[in-house]
Amino acid sequence: MNTKLTIAMPKGRIFEEALELLLKAGYNLPPEFDDSRKLILDVEAEDMRFILAKPMDVATYVEHGVADVGIAGKDVLLEEERDVYELLDLRISACYLAVAGLPGTAMNDVAPKVATKYPNVAAAYFREQGEQVEIIKLNGSIELAPLIGLADRIVDIVSTGRTLVENGLVEYERIKDVTSRLIVNPVSYRIKDERINELVTRLSTVVSLEVK
């Protein structure tokens, strides 16, 4: 039986913080691991394979079984609603989803528009508020939408709030706190339960120490 554990991880900030957790958990990862430009990295010493992907794709890889486990932001899990199990809150890359717009402006009464890269999250939030809005999906530079009159509001990830301030926007409502989570493919969880549970145990120990 193939015992190699395949882990999908997003590039960027989450990768750097997750790598630190794995090292603290005692995993023997090579020094050049975080500098590599490869998209697939095999670590024979740990019988592991890492797939480096865009944040929005991690849960897809795990759902379809090309990765056994993955590390994904809660924002992605809320938006994508993939068939995966969420095993552990890693408490890294903390941020939150928020509604923002130009200061002192009200939503259009006739045809309010909201721009976001999270259409499902945004639609659900405004539906819960009893507001009917038109959702406009964008893939980047969400802050631009209110500035050019494309939308009344945006729904986006906020970390420090600096990007909003630099673009003359203000936060109106906070929707959901976001951290990165360890997720698993349901079939892999049955077949490779020992390896996956060991990973969860070791990471849980590190996370609990980090929180204290």
Image: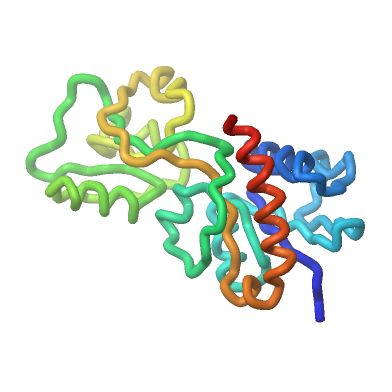
In the image: residue 23, left or right of residue 140: right
Q: Position of residue 197 (x, y in %)?
A: 67, 62
In the image: residue 108, left or right of residue 23: left
Q: Position of residue 180 (x, y in %)?
A: 55, 45
Q: Position of residue 71 (x, y in %)?
A: 61, 52
In the image: residue 98, left or right of residue 74: left
Give the camera-side residue of 1 and 153. 1
Give the camera-side residue of 167 and 63. 63
Q: Quadrant of the C terminus?
A: top right
Which quadrant of the figure has residue 108? top left
Which quadrant of the figure has residue 91? top right
| Vertical side of 80 occupied by 161: above or below | above
| Vertical side of 4 occupied by 71: above or below | above
Give the camera-side residue of 157 and 209. 209
Which quadrant of the figure has residue 190? bottom right
- Which residue appears at 59% of the width and 69% of the height? 185
Q: Quadrant of the N terminus?
A: bottom right
- Which residue appears at 90% of the width and 60% of the height? 44
Residue ranking furthest to the bottom: 1
- Which residue appears at 55% of the width and 60% of the height? 59
- Which residue appears at 47% of the width and 34% of the height? 95
